Image (cartoon, rainbow, N blue to C red):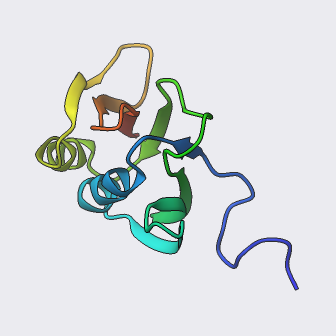
Amino acid sequence: MDFKPENYPSMSPYLICGDGTALIAFVEEAFGGVVQRRFDRPDGSLKHAEVLIDDSILMIGGGATSAQSVTPHIHLYVPDPVAVIDRALAAGATIVQEPERKSDDDDLRGGVRDPSGTTWWIASQ
């Protein structure tokens, strides 16, 4: 038996937010995320979820805890950053940085902030 679920990376970002269910919906719509596992509390609120985005797992904790994330940032490589940023904006994000390729960087990168406050840096080489 392996020490982690099949096809999971060894390290995953873990976001704890007030409305984890809304964050899951955003990740599904904006980034094509697919829930792999979800555990709810007896009252039906989210306790923990794991969402697959391409080859990575994003772990999300629900808000009934004192361990709130403070303005987390996640970097995500995708084939078409402009299209993904457009989907994120349609899913309720706000723009942090328009997609651009800076002179000292090979990546085309832009940023959005989702409704839970997470900043997503979306890029492609």
- Residue at the extreme top: 103
In the image: residue 41, left or right of residue 22:
right
In the image: residue 72, left or right of residue 89:
right
Closer-to-camera residue (101/11): 11
Residue 120 on image: x %, y %: 38, 36
Residue 82 on image: x %, y %: 20, 41
Residue 93 on image: x %, y %: 21, 37
Q: Quadrant of the C terminus?
A: top left
Residue 59 on image: x %, y %: 56, 55
Q: Quadrant of the N terminus?
A: bottom right
In the image: residue 120, left or right of residue 1:
left
Closer-to-camera residue (40/35): 40
Q: Is residue 4 above or below residue 11?
A: below
Q: Is residue 37 above or below residue 105?
A: below
Q: Quadrant of residue 41?
A: bottom right
Q: Is residue 54 above or below residue 63?
A: below
- Residue at the extreme front: 43
Q: Residue at x 34, y 17 (%)?
A: 102
In the image: residue 54, left or right of residue 91:
right
- Residue at the extreme bottom: 1
Q: Residue at x 22, y 41 (%)?
A: 85
Closer-to-camera residue (32/101): 32
